[in-house]
């Protein structure tokens, strides 16, 4: 299955209805094939859908943990800067 870097501007994802410019794959429409050619609908790639789901489910938990963190603890970001 080939992944395309840009979602077609004139289409929307038939699963979620979004039209954002993200990587996508084409899913064939049953019964439209004629030899090697068939109609297809774009759908966001699985990786993008998983990232979106993780963000949606984990962001509130991380925000709550950050708000409830101990005030005497020290924290650093990925670059090594103290925050």
Image (cartoon, rainbow, N blue to C red):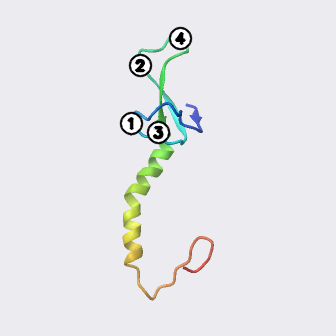
- Dividing the picture into quadrants, the one containing residue 22 is top right
Asked whether disc 3 touches disc 2, contact meaning CB atoms under 8 Å apart, the reply is no
Mark closest to the chain's N terminus, 3 or 2? 3
Assign a secondary structure to mark 2. loop
- Do the residues bearing badges 2 and 4 touch, measured as CB atoms within 8 Å? no
Mark 3, secondary structure of its residue: loop
Question: Which disc number belongs to residue 30?
Answer: 2
Q: Is residue 68 above or below residue 34?
A: below
Q: Residues within 10 Å of mark 3 (few under 14, many from 20)?
A: some
Q: CA distance from mark 2 to mark 4?
A: 13 Å
Q: Secondary structure at mark 4?
A: loop
The residue tagged 3 is 19
Which residue corresponds to mark 4?
Answer: 35
Which one is earlier in the sequence, the residue at label 1 or at label 4? 1
Mark 4: give few (<14), some (14-19) or many (20+) Cα within 10 Å. Answer: few
State the separation of the CA atoms marked 2 and 1.
16 Å
Earlier-in-chain disc, 2 versus 4? 2
């Amino acid at each position: 299955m080939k992944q395309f870097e840009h979602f077609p501007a004139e289409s929307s994802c038939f699963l979620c209805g979004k039209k954002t410019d993200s990587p996508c794959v084409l899913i064939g429409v049953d019964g439209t094939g004629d030899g090697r050619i068939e109609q297809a609908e774009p759908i966001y790639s699985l990786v993008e859908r998983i990232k979106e789901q993780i963000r949606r489910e984990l962001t509130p938990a991380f925000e709550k943990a950050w708000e409830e963190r101990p005030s005497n603890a020290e924290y650093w970001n990925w670059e090594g800067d103290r925050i």
